[in-house]
Amino acid sequence: MEANSPDTDPLMTAVDTAANTPGVVAISNSYGGAEDGTITAADAHLNHPGIAVTASSGDSGYGVSWPASSPYVTAVGGTTLTKAAGTPRGWAEKAWSGAGSGCSAIEPKPSWQHDTACANRTVSDVSAVADPASGSASTTPTTAAAPVPSATS
């Protein structure tokens, strides 16, 4: 499903259309914008119980973007993967400094988040390899990472 413009209303129409399509079990959102007082009204369009709704956290480093900050999505950040000889997996993984993250200025903390460092919604929830230095072929790293959790749900 694709919106006909990058504005909030068409994007939310696309999300709702996807959610109302029979057989859909996951919706991956790979766009983001600044949080402001107007976006919380659009949160309801991301609330689709029984459907995994993910959103990329962004590729601009520390800072929160919406819809990743919505309490109705799983916010997907990024990691850096490097070879690590002598380790059981053969790889080492750490948070990627280019992935969006932080504490929402306006979105409430979901009941399932229990960290104490942020009174509001904390971003990110999960991460997947996104650092282009890890060999990711994507030019929009967390866009590539966003569908990973929904593909495994």
Image (spheres, helix red, strand yellow):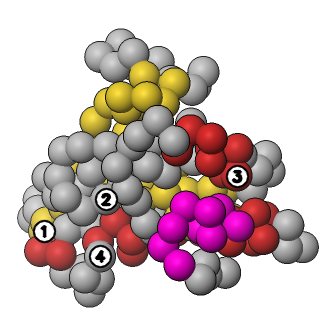
Taking the image as shown, residue 106 lies to the left or right of residue 108, namely left
User: Real-space Cα distance between discs 3 and 1?
Assistant: 40 Å
Question: Which residue is denoted by mark 4 in the rendering?
Answer: 140
Q: Quadrant of the C terminus?
A: bottom right
Is residue 150 positioned above or below 49 on the image? below
Q: Amino acid at mark 4?
A: Thr
Q: Earlier in the sequence, mark 1 or mark 4?
A: 1
From the image, tell me which residue sits under label 3. 45
Q: What secondary structure is marked by label 2?
A: loop
Going from N to C along the chain, the mark reached first, 3 or 4, is 3
Question: How far across and how far down the image is residue 127, in percent?
Answer: 37, 53
Q: Specify the amino acid type for callout 3.
A: His
Q: CA distance from mark 3 to mark 2?
A: 20 Å
Q: Is residue 108 visible?
A: yes
- Of the numbered discs 4 and 2, the one sitting upstream in the chain is 2
In what element is the residue under mark 4?
Answer: loop
Asked if 146 appears above or below 62 in the picture, the reply is below
- Is residue 113 visible in the rendered image? The answer is no
Mark 1 surroundings: few (<14), some (14-19) or many (≥20) residues within 10 A:
few
- Answer with mark 3 or mark 2, whichever residue precedes in sequence: 3
How many residues crowd mark 3 within 10 Å: few (<14), some (14–19), many (20+)? some
Q: Amino acid at mark 2?
A: Gly
Q: Residue at x 13, y 66 (%)?
A: 82
Q: Nearer the viewer, residue 36 or 147?
A: 36
Image location of residue 85, percent across then percent down: 9, 64
Residue on which the image places disc 1: 83
The type of residue carrying mark 1 is Lys
Q: Return the disc, 2 or 1, that comes first in the chain's sequence.
A: 2
**Residue tagged 2:** 58
Camera-side mark, 2 or 1: 2
- Front: mark 3 or 1: 3
